[in-house]
Amino acid sequence: MSSTSVAHTVKDTILTAHAAWANRPYIWTLRDGVYESVTYGEIIGRACAVASNLIDEGFRDAHIAIFARNSAEWVIADYAISLSANVAVLMDATWQLLEAKNAALLVKPAILYYDSSTKDVADTLKEYLPDTQFRSLNELPGSLDSIPDVLPDRDPNDLAKIFFSSG
């Protein structure tokens, strides 16, 4: 898809932004006490690597939760879930066990990504979600040099996100 075309799907939107702005800063993230710029290309390259892994593992239309603070890795996981035609379940990182448990039991995620701020609650959730795989956002794979051809298309009307808000 060219950068002048109108994007019609989540995948098209993400890949159009990548084509247009690959070398531009996308997000600033805190690493080792210092804020670093991360480009669109870096984000999308890593998101494609995670998406490829999810596809290779057979995940499609699965609920995949992100229970973590905002970070570059959070964005990478969110894009990867969309690029692999799964449903992103966005959980509030400030939740205590009761809120996290209620949300997780409602959506029954196949995978739950967590970070250091939510690890303790995520560890406790394991007893309530025996079929869920728990994965650290710190262990996402590195970047791919090109966009893989295996990224599936999905209907623009398919469910893409479930997010819980406090409002």
Image (tube, rainbow, N blue to C red):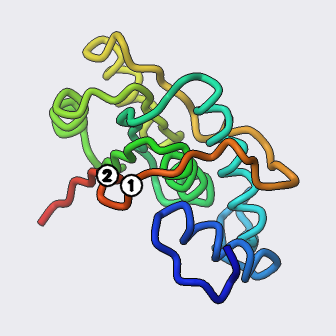
* Residue depicted at 52% across the width and 76% down the height: 7
Figure check: 53 above or below 91: above
Indicate the secondary structure of the residue bearing disc 2: loop
Can you tell which mark lies on residue 81?
none
Residue on which the image places disc 1: 155
Front residue of 96 and 143? 143
Residue 49 is drawn in which quadrant?
A: top right
Q: Position of residue 62 (x, y in %)?
A: 38, 32
The secondary structure type at the circle numbered 1 is loop
Disc 2 marks a residue whose amino acid type is: Asp
Give percent across and percent down for residue 34.
74, 68
Q: Residue furthest left?
A: 167
Q: Quadrant of residue 22?
A: bottom right
Q: Quadrant of residue 86?
A: top left
Above/below status of 30 relative to 116:
below
Q: Quadrant of the C terminus?
A: bottom left
Residue at mark 1 to residue at mark 2: CA–CA distance: 5 Å
Who is closer to the viewer here, 69 or 106?
Answer: 106
The number of numbered badges drawn on the structure is 2
User: Within 10 angstroms of label 1, few (less than 14), some, or many (20 or more) residues?
Assistant: few
Which quadrant of the figure contains the N terminus?
Answer: bottom right
Residue 42 in the figure: left or right of residue 163: right
How many neighbours does mark 2 have within 10 angstroms: few (below 14), some (14-19), or many (20 or more)? few
Q: Note whether 146 is above or below 55 in the view shown.
A: below
Q: Kindly identify which residue carries mark 2.
A: 158
Residue sitting at x 25%, y 15%: 128
- Look at the numbered discs 1 and 2 and tell me whether their residues touch, using CB distance below 8 Å: yes
The residue located at (65%, 26%) in the rendering is 56
